Image (cartoon, helix red, strand yellow):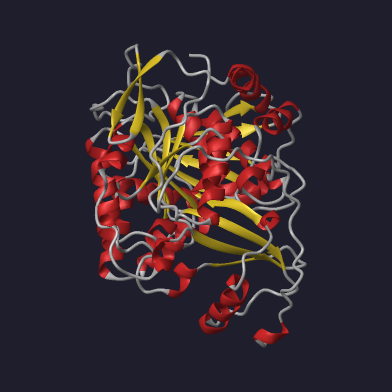
Amino acid sequence: MHHQAIALKSPTPFPHHHRQPPSPSLGRLLVLPISHTLRPNNRSCSFVSCRGIHIPVPKYLPHSLASSNGALHDRKPVAVKTIDVATLGNLCVDIVLNVPELPPPSPDVRKAYMEQLSASPPDKKYWEAGGNCNMAIAAARLGLNCVAIGHVGDEIYGKFLLDVLHDERIGTVEMTEETDFVNGSIDSYETLLCWVLVDPLQRHGFCSRADFSKEPAFSWISKLSEPVKSAIKHSRILFFNGYDFDEFSPNVLISAVDYTVEVGTSVFFDPGPRGKNLLAGTPEEQKALGHFLRMSDVLLLTSDEAASLTGIRNPILAGQELLSRGVQTKWVIVKMGAKGSILITTSSVTCAPAFQVKVIDTVGCGDSFVAAVAFGFIHDVPLITTLAIANAVGAATAMGSGAGRNVATLKHVIELMKAPNLNEDDEFWNELLGEHLDTQEITFLKKVVINGSNNRMKLIALQRVVSDLLPKLESVQLEGKVPS
């Protein structure tokens, strides 16, 4: 396909239903202002300023780190954890366009295609917050206090991204300090754009400037700033994904993991499609990937990604292999798409079929899923319930168009769980579990349970899970917080 044959003049946008975000009141020059926007229902707190970042310090002692779901680790935190979830890197603006055909795989043709798209800013109605913004927005809508750590440029796209995060009550922490900037191309300081191209068959193609550079987009960032360290120290969870390698050097990412572990913050890692590339990447990338796989508290992968990293096709056995390699890994969660999801620990296997919904767009489903897993991890929710809400949030996102502000709302998640319909495929699950050794406890979510268990597994009725979960979600909807 020749580049000239691709019509780009009048792309058709996805229907975005967004509110006008307020203009940020914080001025900045290249460096993102460091702020933590508090939800209005936060407990009474005072503020401690640390080089510009305001960390809320509650006037109560934190709950014990012991938990019934095995989530919270034994490491002693070195600070009060006032932020539920922080994300690191992968703050980008998605430009979502419908196109007649997706670009071919040739890097040169794709680069020329992207440069044609980038020649002038497309209409703002095509813009959406992307990358880790998806996870942060979904988590904030579940009532979690969230902070996005990363680099955003001082141009129209960066201002747009800040507006969106501010509107969703998500705090922001700039990855760099002014002293980090060096002479170089202005492009290297600009907000990353990801062109999300959708053909008539709803197939997706993605491209950004990070795809065409041998160096990470923000290779000039060489260390964690003090404000970044402060945000990590005060967070319960720090979420990384494989696209972080497009932005930061392996050494910076390793230092971020090590500092996160040091200060008692839990590491969540989703390698995504980049995992396979990293496995065959430079020695530095391979070392960093291995470090993530060993040091993460929670690993989240698709079944294909788990197979790529372990060479094992069975997702349960692959998950157990990843657990055995981990230093402090508590959960390995395998996303099975329309089939559901599996959560593997050292002592149990938990399986939950997916909710049956009309799928409109799968972009952002995995990010939304992670947000709900974080919800269960933090609030000591039973493992089967954690998978159920994660499947529900992912499914509710799939029923909409695009990601960013179009990820699942709490209202839609609650509606889905009040009238649930599981995609039960007994033949698939029986075959999968038939390969599994009988040495661990197996818990399985069913729409209807006649007998609560058999000699192989514990069956949990969906209605029981929904009855336990709905009061928590409705409390978030009404009051913005989860009852203890």
Question: Measuring 64% from the left and 55% from the top, which residue is drawn there?
Answer: 127
For the residue pair 53 and 201, the one nearer the viewer reads as 53
For the residue pair 323 and 479, the one nearer the viewer reads as 479
Residue 245: x, y in percent? 38, 60
Vertical comparison of 472 with 156: above or below: above
Q: In this rendering, does residue 369 appear at all? A: no
Question: Measuring 35% from the left and 27% from the top, which residue is drawn there?
Answer: 55
Total count of labels: 0
For the residue pair 390 and 19, the one nearer the viewer reads as 19
User: Which part of the image, by quadrant, shows the N terminus?
Assistant: bottom right
Q: In this rendering, does residue 36 appear at all? A: yes
For the residue pair 381 and 78, the one nearer the viewer reads as 78
Vertical comparison of 291 with 393: above or below: below
Question: Measuring 38% from the left and 71% from the top, which residue is drawn there?
Answer: 185
Residue 482: x, y in percent? 53, 19
To which quarter of the image does residue 73 belong? top left
Side (left or right) of 235 relative to 102: left
Residue 135: x, y in percent? 52, 43
To which quarter of the image does residue 459 belong? top right
Question: Measuring 74% from the left and 56% from the top, which residue is drawn there?
Answer: 14
Residue 391: x, y in percent? 61, 39
